[in-house]
Amino acid sequence: MTDATMRAVQFNRYGGPEELNVVDLPQPQATPGHVVVRVVASSINPGEASIRKGLLHERWPATFPSGEGSDLAGVVTAVGDGVTSVKVGDEVLGWTDDRAAHAQAVSVPDGHLLPKPAGLSWEVAGSLNVAGVTAWATVRSVGVQAGDTVAVSAAAGGVGSIAVQLAKRAGATVIGIASAANADWLTSVGVTPVTYGDGLADRLRAAAPDGLSAFIDCFGGGYVELALELGVPKDRIDTIIDFEAVARLGVNGDGMAVVDDPGAALAELADLAASGDLTVPIARTYPLEQVRDAYRELEERHTRGKIVLLPNGPAPQA
């Protein structure tokens, strides 16, 4: 990155990770109401991969060349006219709606930023927006409360690993569907692990002999049908990925888009993570130039927690 240019991720057509390129772009400017942030950490998300593949073209089309990335944490380097919420040098986390966070710097509306709590790692701070606010929305969508028994698919993934903990904090008994390799981690956060695969319905019945109150699907591929088979009411099933099942079966499809005040939800999550009351697993970090490798790992769909890009080199200690 020079005073005039920066490195940023772009893709010029729909396709696999090989379509991702790291290119030189002009440095963003601090226009009125906006803040320029030097990005320390920015996580990657499955939805971004689906957009790049063209799978969500009808819902969220790309305009080429397209940048990518929403989550960010970094240091303010410039502020535009009218900005009073932050100043140069502040450590912040937040989001951009411009698909631009996978870059060394980004211009963000000041209302999309909040102070990074002391002690919160950069990697976690740069991972909280999409996965955290989505998880926050799913728990509220199915109305989790004390006494419920809730199952969560992909329970060790980016969204699921947070959703199980939020459901637990709401007083529910939580069953996490994941691979056997994630059983110990789920147990460590107070969640009952159940291995996915053949015989899952029977294993869930055994883990919840009084039945399931609610089901949060973070994976797709038939989990909505399974929840209905197990007697979960439609209005207490939420999927963040199986939009076809939402349309066909009338279950909830609520994610972060339904959250009225995402900044407040993000602030709550950041405080929980900083205090140690919420664990956000960081699976691996990658330099920006290895963004293709980062997405290849993500798209294998076996990641525990979050994969994070570090656009300006290794993150300093919080």
Image: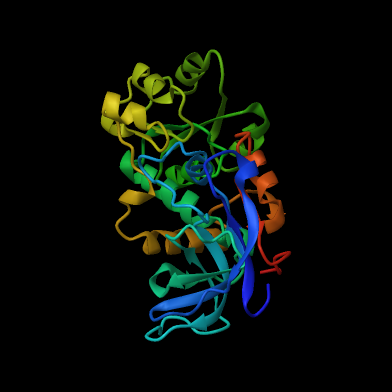
**Residue ID at (37%, 18%):** 230
Q: Position of residue 212 (x, y in %)?
A: 38, 26
**Residue ID at (42%, 35%):** 241
Q: Nearer the viewer, residue 206 or 39?
A: 39
Q: Nearer the viewer, residue 55 or 197?
A: 55
Q: Which image quarter holds the N terminus?
A: bottom right
Q: Nearer the viewer, residue 111 or 98?
A: 98
**Residue ID at (60%, 63%):** 103
Q: Position of residue 207 (x, y in %)?
A: 49, 22
Q: Which image quarter holds the C terminus?
A: bottom right
Residue 3 visible in the picture? yes
> To which quarter of the image does residue 80 belong?
bottom left
Q: Is residue 7 above or below residue 170?
A: below
Tell me: 7 left or right of 107. Answer: right
Extreme right residue here? 314
**Residue ID at (50%, 84%):** 87
Q: Position of residue 186 (x, y in %)?
A: 59, 37
Q: Nearer the viewer, residue 99 or 243?
A: 99
Q: Position of residue 100 (x, y in %)?
A: 51, 61
Residue 121 visible in the picture? no
Q: Is residue 292 above or below residue 25?
A: above
